[in-house]
Amino acid sequence: MKDGRDRGSNPSLESTSSELSTSTSEGSLSAMSGRNELHSRLHPHPQSSLIPMMFSPPESLLASCILRGNFAEAHQVLFTFNLKSSPSSGELMFMERYQEVIQELAQVEHKIENQNSDAGSSTIRRTGSGRSTLQAIGSAAAAGMVFYSISDVTDKLLNTSGDPIPMLQEDFWISTALVEPTAPLREVLEDLSPPAMAAFDLACSQCQLWKTCKQLLETAERRLNSSLERRGRRIDHVLLNADGIRGFPVVLQQISKSLNYLLMSASQTKSESVEEKGGGPPRCSITELLQMCWPSLSEDCVASHTTLSQQLDQVLQSLREALELPEPRTPPLSSLVEQAAQKAPEAEAHPVQIQTQLLQKNLGKQTPSGSRQMDYLGTFFSYCSTLAAVLLQSLSSEPDHVEVKVGNPFVLLQQSSSQLVSHLLFERQVPPERLAALLAQENLSLSVPQVIVSCCCEPLALCSSRQSQQTSSLLTRLGTLAQLHASHCLDDLPLSTPSSPRTTENPTLERKPYSSPRDSSLPALTSSALAFLKSRSKLLATVACLGASPRLKVSKPSLSWKELRGRREVPLAAEQVARECERLLEQFPLFEAFLLAAWEPLRGSLQQGQSLAVNLCGWASLSTVLLGLHSPIALDVLSEAFEESLVARDWSRALQLTEVYGRDVDDLSSIKDAVLSCAVACDKEGWQYLFPVKDASLRSRLALQFVDRWPLESCLEILAYCISDTAVQEGLKCELQRKLAELQVYQKILGLQSPPVWCDWQTLRSCCVEDPSTVMNMILEAQEYELCEEWGCLYPIPREHLISLHQKHLLHLLERRDHDKALQLLRRIPDPTMCLEVTEQSLDQHTSLATSHFLANYLTTHFYGQLTAVRHREIQALYVGSKILLTLPEQHRASYSHLSSNPLFMLEQLLMNMKVDWATVAVQTLQQLLVGQEIGFTMDEVDSLLSRYAEKALDFPYPQREKRSAFSLSTDSVIHLQEIVHQAADPETLPRSPSAEFSPAAPPGISSIHSPSLRERSFPPTQPSQEFVPPATPPARHQWVPDETESICMVCCREHFTMFNRRHHCRRCGRLVCSSCSTKKMVVEGCRENPARVCDQCYSYCNKDVPEEPSEKPEALDSSKNESPPYSFVVRVPKADEVEWILDLKEEENELVRSEFYYEQAPSASLCIAILNLHRDSIACGHQLIEHCCRLSKGLTNPEVDAGLLTDIMKQLLFSAKMMFVKAGQSQDLALCDSYISKVDVLNILVAAAYRHVPSLDQILQPAAVTRLRNQLLEAEYYQLGVEVSTKTGLDTTGAWHAWGMACLKAGNLTAAREKFSRCLKPPFDLNQLNHGSRLVQDVVEYLESTVRPFVSLQDDDYFATLRELEATLRTQSLSLAVIPEGKIMNNTYYQECLFYLHNYSTNLAIISFYVRHSCLREALLHLLNKESPPEVFIEGIFQPSYKSGKLHTLENLLESIDPTLESWGKYLIAACQHLQKKNYYHILYELQQFMKDQVRAAMTCIRFFSHKAKSYTELGEKLSWLLKAKDHLKIYLQETSRSSGRKKTTFFRKKMTAADVSRHMNTLQLQMEVTRFLHRCESAGTSQITTLPLPTLFGNNHMKMDVACKVMLGGKNVEDGFGIAFRVLQDFQLDAAMTYCRAARQLVEKEKYSEIQQLLKCVSESGMAAKSDGDTILLNCLEAFKRIPPQELEGLIQAIHNDDNKVRAYLICCKLRSAYLIAVKQEHSRATALVQQVQQAAKSSGDAVVQDICAQWLLTSHPRGAHGPGSRK
């Protein structure tokens, strides 16, 4: 129980509280605590157990609280979950009493110890007259009181009155253990007495005194005797268990006997008086007894230990007397020298030496043999002897290896080792090197440098307690000093005080001067000692020099004779030590810097000018520098230095002191803040000291208080720093921000003029208060309107002045195009009326478009409800038009300004003139402005407009062309033109906008249009024979020459109209002319556009009387004759100031313009894409581009069109569509684009191959159409073209290559066929896959097998064989390899060709099937082995064809001929068996197993034949022959196993089984035959009925075997008829007999055979293997179906139950509550209470109030005797 208590208090058990067992009925907390301890060791860092505890049952939670010792929480759990009846409730009561008893027992033992100590002291004080009678009476009374106190304690724990504790009841262990009566542990449990065990536990685990242990053991013996007597037994007759288990009575007697043995043995040798004097035997506790009795708990071990203890006392007494012998009063070293002068025998005969050796021997006897216990005494004695030898050797001049022995080395203990070594070094003048070498030689850990430093230097000791104490004191002193000085500097500013712990020191500033505790008689530092320290550690030597005390100068007469003669070393003077220290410090710059930093705050003004070493060597406050607050004088030194710095206002020194010596102090911020506050208030540049202040509130208040003293820049910096601190309170931060804003305004005002009018900001502030108008006028003159607004926030301005200010400011910002600030200005005006007034006045005075746009936007947005509809439309129209107009370049705005009221027309005009860049900005602007606005059109109309003009960018007429050559010539000229354009293009001069140039087929940015210069160079001009005379009046539009009537220019009669040489109508004559012949413009009567485009002849005719003005263009043309033409002449780029197409606000005029409109560069893919990029819907644009491609593809058959360029345009359009789909995230449309691109590639291939029937995209859009095209090419034997088309369209090229290969194969070109097939045939990834390879390979093989073999070159001897083969081939009409003579099949060419394709491109299954198909079964098997194919290939390729064709025996013969042992075929044969088993081909399987000689599996197959599809045991009886065969197979297997036991192991594929398993299976077969015969006989007699399928046999699982046992028991005439066989089944298979009996009984209940239930019970009881409770269990199981049992039979079954508890349970099951109550109240009270509570609970559940009241009344009135006292209800 102690173990459970101790571990329960462990916090680590909290993590495992949820893992406790929910069943605590056994009441053993120690077991659970043991499991928890194991879990805590396995998991040292437990995870959070909150969730498991939430889901744990209440019992587990209660047990967890008990284990942790949380009894209050345990009571809460007990009350919350109503667990008073649970076993854990009793454990809680016991644990509470146990804790109280432990505390009281400790108090009793404490009293006993006090009495013993008082008695011992009185014994010492008394005289020799003996003990007085009064003292004897007192001792006896005390002993009696002790006895009664211990009895009270044990009675409190073991008292059973009141609420009984279950675990202290006598039958607790028997009732909870549930041990069988015959179990060995039951005898041990019967001897247990819980009260005696509780007393025994207290004695063994909680007692520390012999008396208490003895009293508790006696109590335990009394309790045990009374418990055994009540059961008719005596403790003397308790014997050892038969199994050697030592029960509780034996252990109790043995420990009591061993505990009393010491006293009994001692009483025989010593008298009581000696015992009282303290010389008696040791009275130990049980814990000490168990530790002492090693190796076993016996009297011999106790006696042996007692003897050794007495001998040890005698030896120690003798050693003590030897050490107390009078020694001459000489120093320890002198005494050692005298002992060393003695001879070795005298030293060994010394009493100390002899007694020490005896002591070692005695301790060696007490040490167990083989243990590794440390010999501390021997080690200590060896150390003393070694140290004495080293000290004597250092004084001796003899060699070091001479052994020195002393009799009493313990003389050294009179002084410390350091004192002895220092005496040698400084008094005896022993060289430090020699002494250190001797110590190192003997491995003594005695440091000579440490001795030197400790003797010659001031002690520097680290003391944590002193440091912590001085830290708190330092906080108090420095805080008091800082507060005192701050109170003088700051009057009304509160400062925070440091929160230091309370100290016992007086907080007053009076301090006593510190006197060094150093003894002046100690030796000083010598040169040899210093040299030795340097040799060991220069850093240590440096510290020694610093800590060496200054030596006083002595007079010459005081020198000793050794010093006078130079033999004694003179100590170093202070100046010498300082010089040595200075030289050493130069080697340690970091240490020197540390010393300087620590000494700097402490030095005074008198110490200036001297070196660091001179100041520190011998300085009284050096310990403070080196140790800090560990120094005992640190507090006084630091306080004095801090006070000096404050008085002298040396703030940096005070801060440095707190920084250096306050690193380990947590709360110095308040002291530093106080010092900094003084510096801020007193220093001229006090603002610099505000930054280090930690307290944000203090820093802010100081800044606000003293900000008027400092310059402007400093004030701004410190205010910004204070505001940035997040710890500042909101109110204080607002004050800081207001002050900062005010100072910033002053800063801006002072910066308006280069020589400031005011000297500082304080003067400016005074002027703002006294004369504000002057300041405002100066700000307005500088046009700093924002500054004026900020200044107005500080000083008030009248309303009219404020409106004027805002208006001027607004117009100023708008003129500067700073719209953001203008908008911010309007938002800052708080009054809406004032804002509207300012905006309207500004709008009335606007002078620029941008200003009007901004004001219109603002009025529309913010004052929409206050404007009229007319005003609103005007503003809206002006807003949108001006917004778009502002996006255009300024020099081009005039051409579009007339359309500002209709933004859609403006966008259309931009598109007509190919200003795509400008249109892009315009569309973006419209998208932003049209959101939520109604201005006559929507973005859908914008998208429609863009789509229409994108389509126009691809429009071109299709004129009839006469010759293909002319088209080729034009194409060549176009290609040449593109090359010139590429050469003339300059990246610096080319505009980046796509509106500048577009190419129809070339990359974007290049336009291929014929220029006049090129035409003139290619075709020299010829003068016409007659001058052309235009008609008198210009013809109307409908009178112009139609486009389709002419294909050649009607002016030059040479230029053909092509895709790039467009038709143009002369507005004067109406003829069709080329661009080269219509370069002029003039005014034409009746023409809408003037000047209009006319042909050169009309222009010359109309202007022949006008002298031609010299122009720059002809000069340019003339100058370009000898040079390469400029880019502007090669590609006609519209000039920046030219607008060819102009729209109007009238829709009629616009329709005429649209009807005449065309793009000069059409078809231009780049222009189309650039326009569609402005479309909002990328998906719709992508689909439009696809439609355009389909439309363009229809013109590929036109001979006038360059199909190659057209396909390039289509590719570019499709690529752009794909990019649009990617942008929109339409993955499904990407596949559509890829499909169209592949189709365009197909068209390109067909065009390049000059294929005549080029389809359009619509015609080859479907995959079936592409397939038909590919098939047409293959049918026409265009194999190469078919492969390319397949590749481009994404079709599988395998078919094309295969067709090509088959063509080669049919042509007899086997080599070419192999090459073509290598493109389409691939070897399978897995050669062992279960198929015959690809269909293509199969086709090739089939063709080779069915085709006549071509002529093969043979030798002369083979001609006749070849003729015979040819004759057979002609006869069979195919290449039947089966008719080829044997031996010639391998030489057949087509046979080898088949094997080539099979081996390279097919699977192993195909190869094997080929061999099998041609009756090469041996080759198939050899191939299977060589390739190590899996069994599935064997099954599919060889085994199935063999047994299906009836050649299984042939296959078996081949297998055995290849490998007689069948080892290599093992896995294949096993797979074949599994295959046959899956197919249910068990007869073939049985035959194959016999071939394999697998007797075990053959027996299993026979068993399967026996039990398969059997519907009754009558049928099973007819199949008993199969069981006999199975038995024969197993017998054969046993014979083979016995014969091969000495040989090698048998083959692996035959099933193995041990002889024992085979015998067991044969027994099962024999038992099954008996069961079959019995049930066959029963079914024939009609006593057994046919059960449901499947029929149960002994070859099934345990459940089926139990069914067999039940069937046998119930199948006979009665239960006894088949019980014997059923019992054998249960015993042989170790089935659950009780469950089987219960099932049989349930079936008897179902059959209403109640009399046979009694017969079943009789058989079960007579079987000899049933427990006592099995009968009750069977009956209770039957009663679960009580509703079907008649009342009289039901009562009879209940009466047959032996146990009364089971009877109560039976009545409760049958809902007979009153009968259950009557039986329950007849039991013993504790059992009756529990049973009545069960009846009460059942009545509550069933709603029987009468029985519930009866039970409640009985529980209230029925109490055990003796429980009606006053304390019974507690």
Image (tube, rainbow, N blue to C red):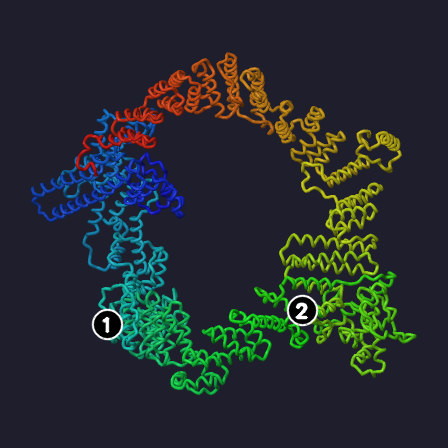
Residue at 82% over, 33% down = 1375
Cα distance in 3D space between marks 1 and 2:
95 Å
Q: Report the front residue among 1678 and 1066.
A: 1066
**N-terminal-most mark, 1 or 2:** 1
SS at badge 1? loop
State the SS at label 2.
Answer: helix
The amino acid pointed to by label 2 is: Phe
Quarter of the view holding residue 442: bottom left
- Image quadrant where residue 300 sits: top left
Three-letter amino acid code at the position of disc 1? Leu
The answer to the question of whether label 1 and label 2 lie on touching residues, with beta carbons closer than 8 A, is no
Query: Along the line of sight, which residue is nearer the eye, 1524 or 583?
Result: 1524
How crowded pointer 2 is (Cα within 10 Å; few <14, some 14-19, many 20+) is rated as many
In the rendered structure, the answer to whether residue 1323 lies left or right of residue 928 reads right
Q: Quadrant of the N terminus?
A: top left
According to the picture, the residue beneath numbered tag 1 turns out to be: 509
Q: Which residue is pictured at 75% across the width and 29% down the height?
A: 1415
